[in-house]
Amino acid sequence: MSDDLQKAQRFREAALPYLDDVYTLARYLLRDASDAEDAVQECYLRALKHFDSYRGPAMKPWLFAILRNVCNAEYARRAHRPSAIEDTPSAAEQTPLWQESEASPETEVLRSRDAGAIRKLIDALAEPFKETFVLREINNLSYREIAEAAGVPVGTVMSRLARARAMLRAAWTAEEEHSR
Amino acid sequence: MTCDEARILLHALLDNELDAGHAREVEAHIASCPECAAELAAQREMQRVLADTDLRYTAPASLRSRIEASLPQPQRQQPTRRSVLRGFAMGSAVSALAASGVVALVLRQDDQQRILSEVVSAHLRSLQAGHLIDVVSTDQHTVKPWFNGKLDVAPPVIDLTAQGFTLVGGRLDYIDARAIGAVVYKRRQHVINLFVSQTSSTEHRPPKTQTMQGFNCRRWGERGLNFWAVSDIGADELAEFVDKFEAAMKANVEG
């Protein structure tokens, strides 16, 4: 078997098991099924290309790091269109880390929602908070792995995650109030 | 511990990411603060509901097969040694060599073009709010040590304020699927990103300016490092920046 084929085989075994994970992150980051497919394919092409020089970290954060690079290029492309995904940390910063609830918080129980409704709430989170949230809550990365994938310090991961969860809960309870 | 600190750390507690010492501190705060205790309970509840819901997506089978198809496949029919020998051995070897030379040249160019486009994307990204700088400092002795341990190279950080280019900080970025250092300068209100990465070649490559999407990019190589300076300032000003940077770097090494 030639070197190329052996390499392709090793790559297949190491990277393809994470296809659903990579696709999940792409769907949340890009909010569009066909853009997500293109981004994932591009991610795997780049990963194969750089597989020779891959020495870790773990495969999953490495793939995510490549994917977010691909997605950032897509954001830059969309930035020229009116439907751009706005990166608005300034608006996000204004969400308080907690809100004073009128109902006693101890008894406040979030009603179970169907997956589609929760996905919509997550989709609406601002970047980079959404990315941190999805990597932790849905892709089950540790803080250190998220830091590697996103190229930021662990402390930043921690504060982004706190803010993402605060924003999500605020949106969630606001919607429940509304539907009550 | 203040409530503000606890509101962040309680998430790390929920995720089992705190060491024993910090976990005790957070728990002690929560035991004495009903508001933070309520927040922890509410977040735990939300985490439970999220964990009970399937929020993942499944990649379509067509995507899987497209990726499979793009991997090198075992070939059905390998040409036999004899058939090669029977052919115009000399002639085909020469043309194969020529062809591969052309292909290599084309690929190299393509690669450089792709990296240039990634560098320009990274510059664009850095201009979006809140992305420009990880370490904010006009002091090169603060910015330089900040990169330690984050990269496999130590990017030269040189203060050019006296020469009209203000050092404003540093950042980690990602180019060509690798972490890369970015040193950030300002000329009036214009941002200059100086990206620095490692290269195996130690030879000096003279600066060359290219333009992409309205940005000027001047790249050069020196002492095992690749440099890309990107900005929307004019090509002549960018060249001046690179000249001053190189002169200062030379002076640093000799001094």
Image (spheres, helix red, strand yellow):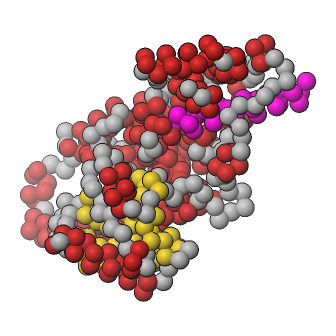
Q: Position of residue B158 (x, y in %)?
A: 33, 68
Q: Position of residue B84 (x, y in %)?
A: 13, 57
Question: Above or below — where is A22 with respect to B216?
Answer: above
Please report the residue visible at 41 percent of the width from the left and 40 percent of the height from the top.
A148
- What residue do we see at 64% from left, 49% from top? A89
Q: Quadrant of the C terminus of chain A?
A: top right
Query: Is residue A169 highlighted in magenta?
Result: yes
Residue B82, image x and y in percent?
10, 52
Of residues B23 and B200, the one nearer the viewer is: B23
- In the image, is A6 to the left or to the right of A166? left
Q: Which residues are magenta?
A: A157-180
Instruction: Say left or right for B62 vs B217.
Output: right
Please tell me which residue lies in front, A13 or B175. B175
In this rendering, is residue B208 above or below A63? Answer: below
The image shows a total of numbered marks equal to: 0
Q: Nearer the viewer, residue B51 or A1?
A: B51
Name the residue rendered at 44%, 41% in the picture: A153
The quarter holding residue A114 reads top right
From the top left corner, tell me how far across and down residue A137 is, in percent.
57, 27
